[in-house]
Amino acid sequence: LPSVTKIYDTVIYPNNLAFLANGSSVVPSGLFNVNASGRVDPVGNFTGFDDSTEYFFGLSPVPSLPSYTAFTSAPIVSFTSGCASVAASVVYLDTTVVNPNATNNGDFVTVLKEVAFWHFDDDGAVLYYDAWIPNLAEWTSVAQGGLDFTNSIIQEVVIAEELCPAIQDRCVGDNQQYANTLDCIAQLSLKKFGSFDEVWGDDITCRTIHVILTQIRPEVHCPHVGPTGGGKCVDVNYTTVYAEDDVALFGGPEGSVFNCPTDS
């Protein structure tokens, strides 16, 4: 429980700001094994310390327009463990308004739920994880002030006024992906928008997630928001990535990693 508690304490605002500014170097020691790997559904599979910590801590929202929402607390509402190496948890990421100049500052907005299975190394650091965020699309809409991301006009605004300007601002020099903002808009407008309930694909929702991480490691994440998706924002086979990849991802036979040893 202490390791899981510290992980979610690092996710909440403003604790997440240090990670956004400095990357994985500021992750408290003992939270993730250097070889940590796992899955966060519906975002993707991740291998290594940097990838794992970026997708846990780097995607936590920072108050901004239109709604100035952020995670301000993360109570662990369920936790169970039958041995030292394996645990399961349910956390509610409380989403509130953080805007000191507004009358609604501190108002509760909604909750994002995350269910996770954990496998710890001998020192208590996370070695493998399998997490699920249900109803991410609905949470995204509510947290953004009720935006309807299925509306084609909203989709056009996301591409032209948010995604492409951010890509062009952060992905420069050797990391540049598009000739200019208009080129970015033209190319990405041809792609499907996608859904936040299945971010893993060659679509816009995937790129809106990965563009956040371009501020941490642009050399790694800029290709993910580019025309080809850079191996991350690409269409995948459901059976392969959610079942057949388990052995490679979790380092053991399917069904064994998140079970306690038989002699425990």
Image: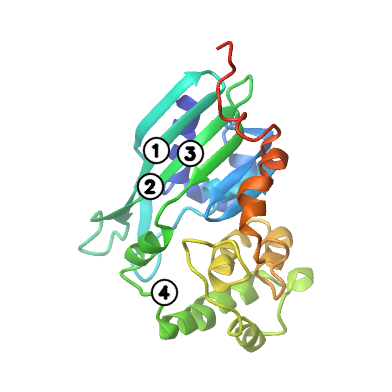
Q: Of helix, strand and loop, which one carries label 3?
A: strand
Residue 51 in sight: no
Q: Which mark is residue 90?
A: 1
Q: How far apart are marks 1 and 2 (CA)?
A: 7 Å
Q: Which amino acid does label 3 sit on?
A: Ala
Task: State the mark number for residue 113.
Answer: 2
- Amino acid identity at mark 1: Val
- Residues at badges 3 and 1 in contact (C-beta under 8 Å)? yes
Badge 3, how many Cα within 10 Å: few under 14, some, many 20+? many
Tell me, for residue 149, which label it has, or none: 4
Residue assigned mark 3: 116
First in sequence: mark 2 vs mark 4: 2
Image x and y of residue 14, in percent: 42, 48
Percent from the top left, x then y, of residue 124? 58, 23
Report the front residue among 63 and 81.
81
Where is the C terminus found, in terms of image quarters?
top right
Real-space Cα separation, disc 2 to disc 4, in angstroms = 20 Å
- The correct choice, above or below, for 166 with respect to 86 in the image is below
Residue visible at 44% across and 41% down in the picture: 115
Q: Give the Cα distance between marks 2 and 3.
A: 10 Å
Callout 3–callout 4 Cβ contact below 8 Å: no
Q: Which of marks 1 and 2 is nearer the N terminus?
A: 1
Left or right of 77? Residue 213 is: right
* Picture layout, residue 6 above or below residue 183: above
Residue 100 % position (x, y): 29, 59
Q: Which amino acid does label 4 sit on?
A: Phe
Distance, label 3 to label 4, CA atoms, is: 27 Å
Q: Please say if the residues under marks 1 and 2 sit with CB atoms less than 8 Å apart.
A: yes
* CA separation in Å, label 3 and label 1: 6 Å
Q: Nearer the viewer, residue 105 or 80?
A: 80
Q: Which amino acid type is shown beneath numbered disc 2?
A: Lys
